[in-house]
């Protein structure tokens, strides 16, 4: 609070900031707010998505307008309906202690009559998309001849979407002496042009470097044949059971197609694109924010309204036509101080684009391989183990325990564990047994994946211990006192991880981690089965502290937001087929679908799976 007060904000805004739990202003807020409060000036602000830009222009605008007047004094233009609504809600929250404040959202897909009625009551601030705003000005429903402040938010994206003429038309109805504040993630030539045309000696502030990606995001690319792109997407999802992602496609048609395939193959997925109605888009975003959807397949235009802090992965199913757009995509993750991963699935002909993007964002991509079937099986098995460990006991089953105990009385603890895991794991294992290598350069069986001189390890630390792949690799390398390339294939999951060393280091690794503790917690390490070697264990303990209920608890029903086909439900892993007379004696896998899909069929716990047959 003291830090925000030092920026020059008044008490009514500081109270709203306290209510929202903000403590420290972001860099763009620290740089922009004092300048915009102290003087009337134009401004160009370059900052990545998710850095707090709305507050950077929102607080100064709210402090400067006269809430006692019914005249429209502030205009904020944004590229999409979703972003328009998001900014409107944030402005209302910021101004909650400003009696008489009226902020109106103006966007297509909603009643123009209702919007005009609200503006007529007196809106000091209008937040609008360019198309609807131009339409309402043309009809004489909005008067912006007396506005004092105009914000062009996500300016580069508005211009990419072809709104240059609309913006020009809109601003021609505004006074020349107004202050114009332009906020953008990148600075292509078109943004420079609009700044020169509509702004007078603007102050320029930059957070980071122009067009450079966030330091919170790591960048990976996977090289596959074009025909294997969809199967690669599913493998990446299966290898990250806690995934909460946005999958980007270039066109609305591809977006719909990929989403429908994912749903058909049992994933909690949905499409977000311009052909959906506003109601459908609202339902999809509501489900996504509620974590009912794990994989949101979106076009670049539709994704501009996504403002969710906990997205773990951005997956570029196809690279964008405009390379600058990659910055916007990767900015969907790694927000609010959290780390994220941007994955790119590419064919040989697209590899050169990776090098172009590297130069633009000044970040190196890591070349990684699509996980083998066995690697996925192992990840999913430990994911199931963690789910079992973290599951709260439902005492409604207590009445049935005597009979259950009687049925299972002849089995030891070890036998019961083996049986529980075998029920589910065997199906996954059988499904992936003959899966091919999707990486370009070979199609060997997964049983031959690991080189004979390499050992893969499982270790019970992960994201929840504040590790990402880079920090875990550094931690292991320093602890084991190995060279920088001696620890490799590091894959960090929520509460466990995998890594490789040459087999010559196996004895060293197992010895170092014998009775090893991190922050007082016993660390367990095992040799992974997918090396073809017997499993060894170092260290004791109960496998780690209780981690509580998992983040991102998935509801049993996934909202498809207008998608066709069956509803996919995917909570947890290794689920059996629901319904049908043969569901008990067949593996719960679809095998190859009519689209050549490759995915065991799953369903949400306690949910329903509707079948076409």
Image (tube, rainbow, N blue to C red):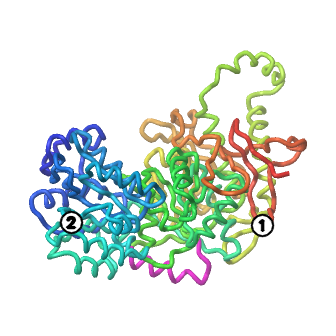
The majority secondary structure of the magenta stretch comes to helix
Image depth: mark 2 or mark 1 in front = 2
Q: Nearer the viewer, residue 485 or 263?
A: 263
User: How far across and how far down the image is residue 183, in percent?
Assistant: 29, 66
Residue 511 seen anywhere in this rendered image of the structure: no
Say which quadrant the N terminus sits in.
top left
**Residue tagged by mark 1?**
596
Q: Earlier in the sequence, mark 2 or mark 1?
A: 2
Highlighted range, magenta: 345-362
Residue at 21% x, 50% y is: 70
Picture coordinates of residue 133, whole percent (x, y): 36, 65
Marks 2/1: CA distance? 58 Å
Give the side of residue 49 with respect to residue 415, left or right: left
Q: Which image quadrant is residue 324 in?
A: bottom left
Tell me residue 212's x, y (percent).
35, 71
Residue at 77% across, 32% down: 416
Q: Evaluate whether residue 571 shows in this view.
A: yes
Q: Secondary structure at mark 2?
A: loop
Asked whether 483 or 606 is in front, the reply is: 606
Question: Residue at point 34% right, 79% down?
Answer: 188
Q: Residue furthest front?
A: 140
Q: Is residue 417 left or right of residue 95?
A: right
- On screen, residue 29 versus residue 306, left or right, reads left
Q: Residues within 10 Å of mark 1 (few under 14, many from 20)?
A: few
User: Which SS class for mark 1?
Assistant: loop
Residue 421 falls in image quadrant: top right
Q: Residues within 10 Å of mark 2 (few under 14, many from 20)?
A: some
Q: Within the magenta stretch, is there residue 355?
A: yes
Residue 452 inside the magenta-drawn segment: no
| Of the pair 287 and 91, the residue shown nearer to us | 91
Task: Identify which residue, 572 or 499, lies in the foreground.
Answer: 572
Residue named by callout 2: 145
């Amino acid at each position: 609070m003291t830090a925000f007060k030092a920026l020059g904000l008044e008490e009514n805004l500081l109270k709203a900031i306290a209510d929202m739990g903000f403590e420290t202003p972001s860099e763009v807020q620290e740089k922009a707010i004092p300048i915009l409060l102290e003087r009337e000036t134009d401004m160009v602000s370059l900052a990545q998505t998710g850095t707090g830009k709305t507050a950077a222009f929102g607080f100064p605008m709210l402090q400067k307008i006269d809430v006692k007047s019914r005249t429209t004094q502030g205009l904020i233009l944004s590229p999409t309906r979703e972003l328009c609504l998001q900014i409107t809600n944030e402005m209302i929250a910021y101004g909650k202690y400003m009696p008489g404040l009226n902020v109106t959202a103006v966007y297509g897909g909603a009643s123009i009559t209702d919007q005009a009625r609200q503006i007529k009551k007196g809106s000091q601030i209008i937040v609008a998309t360019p198309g609807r705003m131009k339409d309402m000005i043309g009809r004489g429903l909005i008067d912006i001849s007396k506005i004092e402040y105009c914000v062009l938010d996500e300016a580069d994206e508005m211009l990419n979407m072809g709104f240059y003429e609309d913006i020009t038309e809109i601003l021609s109805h505004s006074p020349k002496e107004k202050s114009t504040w332009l906020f953008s993630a990148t600075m292509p030539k078109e943004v420079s042009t609009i700044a020169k045309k509509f702004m007078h000696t603007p102050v320029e502030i930059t957070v980071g470097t122009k067009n450079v990606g966030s330091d919170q995001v790591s960048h990976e690319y996977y090289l596959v044949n074009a025909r294997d792109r969809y199967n690669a997407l599913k493998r990446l999802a299966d290898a990250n059971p806690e995934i909460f992602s946005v999958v980007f496609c270039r066109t609305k048609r591809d977006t719909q197609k990929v989403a429908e395939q994912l749903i058909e193959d049992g994933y909690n997925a949905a499409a977000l694109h311009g052909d959906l109605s506003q109601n459908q888009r609202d339902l999809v975003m509501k489900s996504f924010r509620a974590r009912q959807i794990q994989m949101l397949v979106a076009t670049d235009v539709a994704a501009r309204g996504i403002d969710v802090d906990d997205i773990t992965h951005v997956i570029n199913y196809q690279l964008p036509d405009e390379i600058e757009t990659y910055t916007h995509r990767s900015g969907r993750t790694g927000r609010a101080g959290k780390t994220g991963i941007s994955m790119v699935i590419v064919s040989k002909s697209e590899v050169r684009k990776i090098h172009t993007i590297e130069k633009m964002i000044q970040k190196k991509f890591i070349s990684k391989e699509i996980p083998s079937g066995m690697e996925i099986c192992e990840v999913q098995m430990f994911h199931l183990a963690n789910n079992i460990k973290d599951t709260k006991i439902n005492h409604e089953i207590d009445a049935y325990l005597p009979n259950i105990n009687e049925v299972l009385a002849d089995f030891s603890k070890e036998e019961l564990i083996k049986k529980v895991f075998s029920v589910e794991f065997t199906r996954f294992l059988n499904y992936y047994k003959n899966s091919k290598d999707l990486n370009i350069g070979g199609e060997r069986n997964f049983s031959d994946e690991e080189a004979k001189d390499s050992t893969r390890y499982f270790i019970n630390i992960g994201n929840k211990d504040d590790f990402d792949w880079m920090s875990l690799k550094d931690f292991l390398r320093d602890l084991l006192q190995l060279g920088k390339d001696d620890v490799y294939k590091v894959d960090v999951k929520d509460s466990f991880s995998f890594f490789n060393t040459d087999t010559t280091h196996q004895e060293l690794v197992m010895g170092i981690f014998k009775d090893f503790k991190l922050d007082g917690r016993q660390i367990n390490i095992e040799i992974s089965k997918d090396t073809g070697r017997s499993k060894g264990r170092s260290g004791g303990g109960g496998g780690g502290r209780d981690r509580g209920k998992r983040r991102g608890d998935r509801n049993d029903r996934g909202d498809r937001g207008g998608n066709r086909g069956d509803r996919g439900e995917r909570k947890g892993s290794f689920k059996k087929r629901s319904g049908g007379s043969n569901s008990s004696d067949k593996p719960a896998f679809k095998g190859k679908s009519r689209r050549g899909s490759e995915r065991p069929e799953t369903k949400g716990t306690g949910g329903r799976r509707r079948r076409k047959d």
